[in-house]
Amino acid sequence: MIVRTERLDIGYGKRVVASDINLDILKGQFVGLLGPNGCGKSTLLRTLARMLAPLGGQVRLEGRNLCHYDRNELARTMAVVLTERFAAGMLTAFDIASMGRYPYTGLMGRLDSADIAKTWDALATVGATDLADRYFNELSDGEKQKVLFARALAQEPEVIVLDEPTSHLDARNRVDAMLILRRLVREKGVTILASLHDIDLSLKVCDLVILVKDGRVISFGPPEEVLIGDNVAALYDMERASFDSDLGGIELRNGKGEGCVFVVGGAGSASRLYRILSKHGFGVITGVLPENDIDYYVAKATGAVVFGERAYRDISPASYAMALEGLSAAEQVVDAGFPIEPANRPNADLVLAAVAKGKTTHTLRPDGESRQQYGAQASRIISSQSVSALLRRLFAVECLRLAG
Amino acid sequence: MASIASSSGGEAAISGFLARRHARHILVLCLLTGGVFVFLVLNVAIGSVYIPAMDAASIVFRGRESSELFGAVIWDIRLPRALAGLLGGAMLAVAGLLLQVFFRNPIVGPGILGITSGASLMVSLVMLGGLAVGAASLGPLYLSAAALLGAMGVMLVIMAVASKVRDILTLLVVGLMVGFMASSVGSFLVAFAEESRVHTFVSWSLGSFAGFRWDEVGIMGAACAVLCSASFFLAKWLNAFLLGENYAQSMGVNVKLFRYLVVVLSSGLAAAVTAFAGPVAFIGLAVPHIARLFLGSSDNRILIPGCILLGAIVTSLCDLLARTLFSPVELPISATTALFGAPIVIGLVLKRRTSI
């Protein structure tokens, strides 16, 4: 047990931000803190790093009360990477990283050859040795973050506390930063405590996540067990979006503004359609999808009405009948261009049924394929060669309908 | 893994880089030390009475007893003044450096905490107010004592605030406001004072190294030695503080003690100069920047010696100009330091490639 909190209350002065926090963190774990802005993530991290005194309870580091550590001893056990920016003036990246050796050096902070070697190793671990002799202020955000990781690492800590380590970074640097931290956990056995904003990245890098909301730890455990169902949407009070742990991302639920579109999909052909339709505010009904189909997951996550069929089964007449009823409620129908196999043959019939009912029917299949599949009816199906062209036509029909 | 493989080679490279940089720092410091001696000699040799450089040198080396013609000029006037200029410049530059690091703000100087204003207030009370009874007969040391008292008074207020307030910016604002209040009281006194006294006060408030006596130089020298070496031993913490208070704390810096020490040292340095020479503008603000550029580093372990030497040089130069430019009229020291310092600061702020 490297870090443990017992009935910890945190906050500033008299104002309690969160209370009764009980956490157990093992050595070599990557722990992510998630929660909305202002929920107390930073306050908790600052308390764990002894930048704030606990208002109640205690923090134990390697079994000892955090308050009993002397300054240098604590600095040798715990390092931090903060969000605050600073003007380092004319200091090089090496100078900054070598400050990590301060708890080990004498009065004047003179580096001996071992200190230089350790600083160099830290820079090598984060892949920043080529930055060593450049001025820190002239580095990009991603490079600066690497140097700050190296500085923390040069402190040879057991625990590194990071406050939103990815917040200023672009997509690539974000991933790089996470990979570096993961490597520290694996190769150096460092324990990482980080507040994070990317839920999808947390799911992929964390061993444990702590969900903080409204002054309480609402959940604490492996992300695979915690970031499921509606937990994430509830954590951030997201009503118009959802997080799907299987898809590992956030899907927007923007529907019900425009008219309703029935999408006939399957085998992943319709996933991007659900997203784009949801983005533009169309209500989506879809079917018939096997429950193990990617389209099924995306449709669910974007808030579509989904008619499903059990996995690895042919579409049953009952499922077909229900989907047909759903189709009647829609203004327009889209054939996403799914592969037609014996198991999902009824879906092709759904498209023909839509034409027969006089629904405006679109397809993303090339003309030739459409004619081959739907025969004579193909002439009554509007063919679009791209999703954007399809979207334009959907809007056009919708406008006519509203005007008429 | 390529970086690991080449790690030993890279490590040798960085050691070489550090060694070269260290050599450059030593070279610059040696040159600056030479500069200090050059300006000391110039300040002793140049003046309204012409003294050949060789004669001046021989008088200095043979000591006070020499019955040379110019002995009195050099030993009673020029040498104490030149030394006071060197010491005062060194102390102001170090005070400025400490405050720039502490406030993480490149445009603060020793005036910022209201220390010089406190000194001015006490001096104005002595010169203009009711405390003036018999002041003239008590001599200049009385004036210095008053200035020191004023500076220390403000320093105590600032320290009391510093122990209560966590936020450094708040401390900065309090310092500025205390300074404004002190100068406001000074203005009151000026408004109601006699014309001739106002003139004396105004010329004091512009600062001057004229008329320094050996006992004053002695006090200043002792203060300089103690406070500057204490500042030097604070260099590691100052460096850590460049990353901000929270990082400094995470690297084992006792932040509370550090704040206390910086306030005491910078106020002490500024007070010791202001007490004897009056407020001297811009040295504390401009010299740390010039030193950073000369040394190419913000490492305070090298900047503090750099500031001591460069502060001494720049102040000597400014004092020399103040004395000689419009001789026999002597300019106040702040006139030359501001003329010298302000353009440098403007230039630096406009073209800073890496922020200062």
Image (cartoon, rainbow, N blue to C red):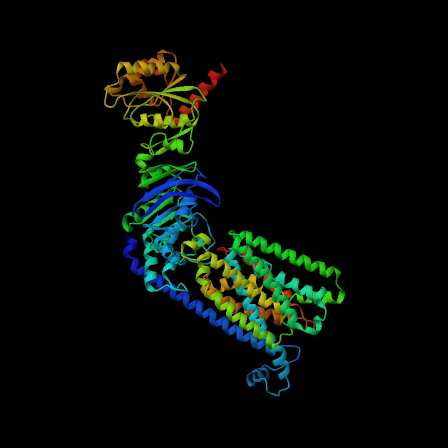
Q: How many labels does the image show?
A: 0
From the top left corner, tell me how far across and down residue B261 is, in percent: 50, 61
Q: Is residue B346 visible?
A: no
Relative vertical location of residue A379 with respect to residue A292 in this rendering, above or below? above
From the top left corner, tell me how far across and down residue B141 is, in percent: 64, 72
Relative vertical location of residue B167 with respect to residue A233 in this rendering, above or below? below
Lateral position of residue B308 relative to residue A179, left or right: right
Which residue in the rendered view is the most extreme toward the bottom?
A: B67
Choose between A205 and B343: the one closer to the eye.
Answer: A205
Relative vertical location of residue A356 with respect to residue B153 in this rendering, above or below? above
Q: In which quarter of the image is residue A122?
A: bottom left
From the top left corner, tell me how far across and down residue A67 is, in percent: 39, 52
From the top left corner, tell me how far across and down residue B278 is, in percent: 63, 67
Q: Residue at 32% of width from left, 13% of height from top?
A: A376
Choose between A176 and B90: the one closer to the eye.
Answer: B90
Q: Residue at 65% of width from left, 74% of height from top?
A: B211
Q: Residue at 39% of width from left, 31% of height from top?
A: A233
Lateral position of residue B84 relative to residue A192, left or right: right
Lateral position of residue A233 relative to residue B187, left or right: left
Choose between B294 and A375: the one closer to the eye.
Answer: B294
Relative vertical location of residue A340 with respect to residue A235 in this rendering, above or below? above
Q: Can residue A290 be seen in this view?
A: yes
Q: In which quarter of the image is residue B109?
A: bottom right
